[in-house]
């Protein structure tokens, strides 16, 4: 993964193939020849707040062996004047 890199430092990020496909790993510690990387998403553990406006709620019927009702919630992050 680090081929061609002469100086690896804590905080550096690299693209890598992870179990879920392409991802980013971050170097979190270096102790001698041991390098510890973190493959979590950069926003993992960060509280995210979204300001949204619900613009429509619709009942959607799906026929299956048993009648099941699904609610579809349509959300936008754009503001309407």
Image: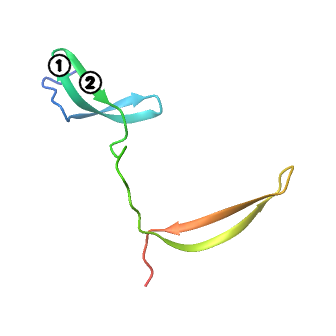
- Does residue 37 sit above or below 57 in this rendering? above
Dividing the picture into quadrants, the one containing residue 17 is: top left
Q: Nearer the viewer, residue 71 or 22?
A: 71
Q: Quadrant of the C terminus?
A: bottom left
Q: Nearer the viewer, residue 69 or 19?
A: 69
State the image coordinates of residue 73 (x, y, percent, origin top left). Answer: 60, 65
| Residue furthest to the bottom | 81
State the image coordinates of residue 58 (x, y, percent, origin top left). Answer: 68, 70
Residue 2 in view: no
- Does residue 74 sit above or below 9 in this rendering? below
State the image coordinates of residue 53 (x, y, percent, origin top left). Answer: 49, 73
Dividing the picture into quadrants, the one containing residue 44 is: top left
Query: Which sits earlier in the primary sequence, circle 2 or circle 1?
Result: 1
Q: Which residue appears at 83% of the width and 56% of the height?
A: 63
**SS for dot 1:** strand
Q: Which residue appears at 72% of the width and 68% of the height?
A: 59
Side of 55 relative to 57 (left or right)? left
| Residue furthest to the left | 7
Q: Are marks 2 and 1 in contact (CB under 8 Å)?
A: yes
Q: CA distance from mark 2 to mark 1?
A: 8 Å
**SS for dot 2:** strand
Q: Residues within 10 Å of mark 2 (few under 14, many from 20)?
A: some
- Does residue 15 sit above or below 78 in this rendering? above
Instruction: Determine which residue is flagged by label 1.
Output: 31
| Residue furthest to the right | 65
State the image coordinates of residue 50 (x, y, percent, origin top left). Answer: 41, 63
Side of 22 relative to 72 (left or right)? left
Residue 5 in view: yes
Instruction: Determine which residue is flagged by label 2.
Output: 36
Residue 74: which disc?
none
């Amino acid at each position: 993964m680090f081929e061609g890199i002469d100086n690896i430092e804590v905080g550096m990020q690299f693209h890598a193939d992870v179990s879920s496909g392409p991802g980013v790993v971050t170097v979190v510690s270096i102790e001698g020849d041991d390098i510890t990387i973190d493959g979590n998403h950069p926003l993992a553990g960060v509280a995210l707040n979204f300001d949204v406006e619900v613009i429509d709620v619709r009942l959607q019927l799906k026929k299956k062996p048993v009648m099941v009702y699904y609610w579809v919630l349509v959300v936008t992050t754009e503001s309407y004047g």
